[in-house]
Amino acid sequence: MKKTFKKIILGVILALLFIGCSKVPITGRSQFITISPQQELALGFQSAKEVLKKEKLSTDPQKNAMVKRVGQRIAQVATKEYPIAKNFTWEFFVIQNDKEANAFCLPGGKVFVYTGIFKYVSNDDELAAVMGHEIGHALARHGAERMSRGQLQQAGAQVLGAVMQGQGNPQNTAMVMQAFGIGSQLGIMLPHSRTQEYEADTIGLFISAKAGYNPKSALTFWEKFAKSGQTPPEYLSTHPAPANRIAKLRALLPKVMPIYEANKH
């Protein structure tokens, strides 16, 4: 037991030493990442294969053309501006699912947009707000960061479990472990995820503006999305409340509008 406990403690200490080894583009926030870019790319490519096996792709020529057109322009900027994107192999897919208003970008540049998002997208600029945000997650390596933090959370739970088992009270152990799981989720993982959402908004706004898309369209998109009323309370959601998100996006406009004006088509 003592040897196992020491190994766990050592593992946590070594993991903590990695904090600050990476920084988020634009925001400069230090990240905790233990996964190499190569590992992340491999995971992204494998995940893309699984998505393509599972999901039905849309055959709508207009939606496919729109997603590809917007995606390629943003990808061109991302590849030029962000070193990690130089190893991306960009591909854009539209998933046929009108009930799902969603999109995501896997590590490596595989971007998926659900047809359900088009209920809230009226033009290329609004779609650019969505795709820029998702591509922003990939550029910031948020997926690798979440995986790394999950590993740290698991290690922390193992340490706490070893301590409680050493006290010899199974009932107390169960209660504390349950509290730790809930507490770490609400206290660390969710707020951190919302930080990632704001970072993706920021990166997405900058790269879409440089690609020639109007940043103000991000506000109109989120205003329409907010009216759907389908968002959970902010403290239980990895995504910020729409009103908070819109306020932060609006605050960025003085910085990104000049970029848009210099690059609009």
Image (cartoon, rainbow, N blue to C red):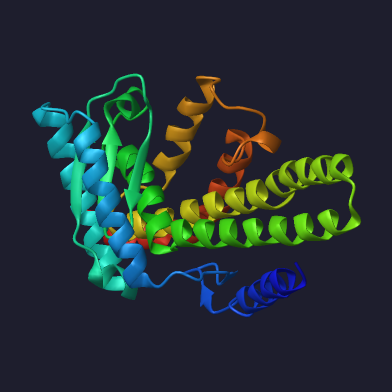
Is residue 159 at least partly visible in the picture? yes
**Which quadrant holds residue 261?**
bottom left
Residue at 20% x, 40% y: name it: 93
Q: Is residue 7 above or below residue 249?
A: below
> x, y (%) of residue 203?
44, 59
Residue at 76% x, 40% y: name it: 178
Left or right of 251 on screen, residue 126: left
Is residue 264 at least partly visible in the picture? no
Q: Is residue 198 above or below residue 172?
A: below
Question: Between residues 103 and 258, which one lies in front from this camera angle?
Answer: 103
Residue at 28% x, 37% y: name it: 113
The quarter of the picture where the N terminus appears is bottom right
> x, y (%) of residue 127?
31, 39
Q: Is residue 74 above or below residue 77?
A: above
Q: Is residue 48 above or below residue 75?
A: above
> x, y (%) of residue 20?
59, 77
> x, y (%) of residue 196?
54, 54
Residue at 69% x, 69% y: name it: 4
Left or right of 194 on screen, residue 124: left
Badge count:
0
Question: Between residues 216 and 45, which one lies in front from this camera angle?
Answer: 45
**Which quadrant holds residue 114?**
top left
